[in-house]
Image (cartoon, rainbow, N blue to C red):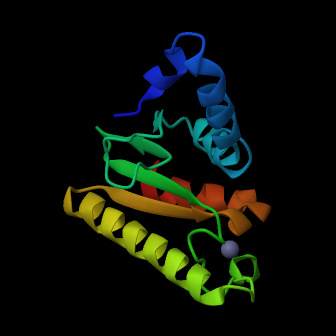
Amino acid sequence: MTTRNDQLLTEGATSERMKRVRRRDTGPELQVRKIARSLGLAYRIRNPDLPGSPDLANRSKKWAIFVNGCFWHGHHQCRRAKLPERNSGYWQAKISRNRIRDKVATEALEAAGYTVVVVWECELREPLIVRTRIKDLVA
Ligand SMILES: [Zn+2]
């Protein structure tokens, strides 16, 4: 299980891990955390023990938020999700596997009583709209 303990590893293994952590802690995820904080929501980040490892989750309130990159998660009809023309078969298969994995995770969470919110990277151009949606669904 990878948890926030990852960040507490001793030197040596640390730098590679930290690089990865930092990379993950940028951009869209940070924006959504900021929105969640502005709504006064309590949450944990990552959550590898929950289906699909939601980026933010609250177990007692039973909600989970995924922050999805449009390309990797295959945002439907989004220009950021346009596949490269080279190796399009490869990309199609890969993205389609990711979409299936996302769907399975969402279904598992919902079956466990969770409210699941997906925030697409491109939606964060309008953070107030995202904020309202999160507020309506989980706050
Ligand atoms: Zn998108």
Q: Is residue 3 left or right of residue 70?
A: left
Residue positioned 48% across, 80% down in the render: 96
In the depicted structure, whether residue 129 falls above or below residue 1: below
Residue positioned 32% across, 42% down in the render: 61
Residue 59 versus residue 17: which sits nearer the camera? 17
Residue 41 versus residue 18: which sits nearer the camera? 18
In the depicted structure, whether residue 73 falls above or below residue 2: below
In the depicted structure, whether residue 85 falls above or below residue 123: below
Q: In this view, which residue lies farthest toward the right?
A: 125
Image coordinates for residue 64, horizontal then vertical, percent: 41, 51
Image coordinates for residue 88, horizontal then vertical, percent: 65, 88
Q: Is residue 31 left or right of residue 72?
A: right
In the depicted structure, whether residue 134 falls above or below residue 123: above
Q: In this view, which residue lies farthest toward the left?
A: 112
Q: The N terminus is located in which quarter? A: top left
Image coordinates for residue 28, horizontal then vertical, percent: 69, 51
